[in-house]
Image (tube, grey):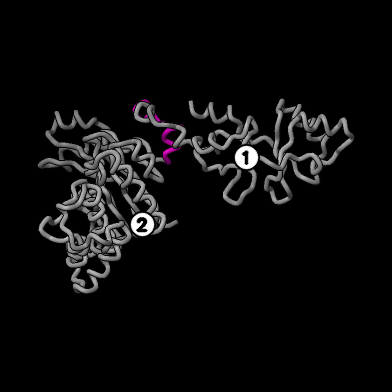
């Protein structure tokens, strides 16, 4: 997966003499509030670095004043950084002249704002096609492409209407369609759903995730809502006072917060939706069909003080399970082949499934067979493992 966006040591300071008065203090690690007190300059971003691979939804989140909106606007140079480097597909954005910057903005990225910024006196179709008009595309082609994008966002029948006749969620879909019509590589989304009612907001989140499955854009998504960040992001960057505190997957951040600030931030997150089965599974060595015998299986279960283990074929795929009771009964009957005593009806779950999904799959007290994307056994998870993981 290639690197699409690179932000390297970006610092953004507002004030009359940022490089001379404030930048040395930022580099010394002086706090934002102290720099403001001593110099009158506002530090919006301080030494921020991250990269976004192609096709990823990268979420930037933090409280008001954390610098998240400034950061996303630095990517397309709506705000000029004081120092640092920003590149798109390896192309230096900050050194681009006006013509090159205009070309980058028109061909590489599009922005979706919190407020829809639609032309109220123009039709939905006109609004969706506006980016192409700015690029000089002829009317027939831009309308054709805009109609196709409206179909993608579920507004195919609304092209001749005006924004005032649409709900808030539908207006935001028009804003999204306008961005998508230009077919950008990168979508910059600054709190795009925060002005919507909760139910409409959830629907828009679902719609965007479903759409992303097919369009596979690189998305930089800004939000102040952790639940939204966890739901939308492949990775999350948490900001505080202009600095990047932690970058990781939603699961990384919830299970391994780097400090007390992040820990407090994530304390109310529903772990059942975020933590994967692979995080809590046990990796006791499975039995292999045709190699391990009943006696070997009995002894190993006793050694690990366990009751159940899965049996795999020579390809590593689970074919059944055995319990200590089954093995004891087999020994009493003189049976030494696992193939003859396997319980082949067993629950199975992907290691990437959430704890919530896994919990719904239990049948009695049998552990789940945990498999990878190829169907190979990678572990097992009992109800108790899941419950502990939810704590």
The answer to whether 339 appears left or right of 361 in the picture is right
In which image quadrant can residue 104 be found?
Answer: bottom left
Q: Which residue is mark 1?
A: 347
The answer to which of 357 and 32 lies nearer the viewer is: 357
Q: Is residue 282 visible?
A: no
Quarter in which the N terminus is drawn: bottom left
Mark 2, secondary structure of its residue: loop
Find out whether residue 252 is within the magenta segment.
yes
Residue 41 locus on image (x, y percent): 14, 36
Find out whether residue 250 is within the magenta segment.
yes
Neighbor class of circle 2 (other Cα within 10 Å; few <14, some 14-19, many 20+) is many
The answer to which of 341 and 240 lies nearer the viewer is: 341
Mark 1, secondary structure of its residue: loop
Neighbor class of circle 1 (other Cα within 10 Å; few <14, some 14-19, many 20+) is some
Q: Which residues are magenta?
A: 249-262
Q: Residue at x 23, y 43 (%)?
A: 69
Q: Which residue is mark 2?
A: 217
Mark 2 or mark 1, which is nearer the start of the sequence? Answer: 2
CA gap between label 1 and label 2 equals 35 Å
The answer to whether 341 appears left or right of 319 in the picture is right
């Amino acid at each position: 997966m290639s690197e699409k966006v690179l932000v390297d040591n970006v610092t953004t300071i507002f004030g009359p003499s940022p490089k001379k008065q404030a930048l040395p203090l930022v580099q010394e690690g002086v706090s934002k509030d102290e720099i403001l007190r001593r110099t009158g300059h506002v530090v919006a971003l301080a030494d921020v670095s991250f990269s976004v691979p192609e096709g990823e939804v990268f979420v930037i989140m933090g409280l008001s004043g954390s610098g998240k909106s400034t950061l996303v606007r630095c990517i397309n140079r709506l705000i000029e950084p004081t120092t640092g480097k920003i590149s798109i597909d390896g192309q230096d954005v900050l050194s681009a002249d006006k013509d090159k910057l205009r070309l980058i903005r028109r061909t590489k990225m599009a922005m979706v704002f919190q407020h829809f910024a639609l032309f109220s006196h123009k039709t939905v179709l006109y609004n969706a096609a506006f980016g192409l008009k700015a690029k000089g595309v002829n009317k027939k082609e831009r309308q054709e492409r805009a109609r196709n994008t409206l179909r993608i966002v579920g507004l195919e029948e609304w092209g001749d209407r005006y924004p005032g006749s649409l709900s808030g969620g539908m207006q935001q879909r028009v804003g999204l369609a306008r961005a998508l019509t230009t077919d950008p590589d990168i979508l910059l989304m600054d709190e795009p759903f925060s002005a919507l009612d909760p139910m409409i907001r959830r629907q828009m989140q679902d719609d965007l995730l479903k759409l992303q499955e097919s369009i596979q854009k690189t998305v930089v998504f800004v939000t102040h809502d952790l639940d939204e960040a966890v739901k939308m992001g492949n990775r999350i960057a948490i900001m505080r006072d202009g600095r990047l505190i932690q970058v990781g997957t939603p699961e990384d951040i919830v299970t391994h917060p780097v400090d007390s600030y992040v820990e407090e931030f994530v304390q109310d997150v529903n772990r059942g939706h975020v933590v994967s089965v692979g995080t809590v599974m046990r990796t006791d060595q499975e039995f292999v069909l045709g190699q391990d015998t009943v006696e070997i299986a009995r002894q190993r279960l006793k050694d690990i003080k366990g009751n159940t283990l899965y049996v795999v074929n020579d390809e590593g795929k689970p074919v059944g399970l055995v319990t200590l009771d089954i093995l004891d009964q087999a020994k009493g009957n003189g049976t030494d082949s696992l193939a003859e005593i396997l319980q082949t009806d067993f629950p199975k779950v992907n290691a990437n499934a959430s704890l919530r999904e896994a919990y719904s799959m239990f049948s009695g007290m049998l552990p789940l067979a945990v498999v990878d994307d190829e169907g190979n056994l990678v572990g097992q998870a009992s109800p108790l493992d899941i419950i502990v993981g939810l704590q």
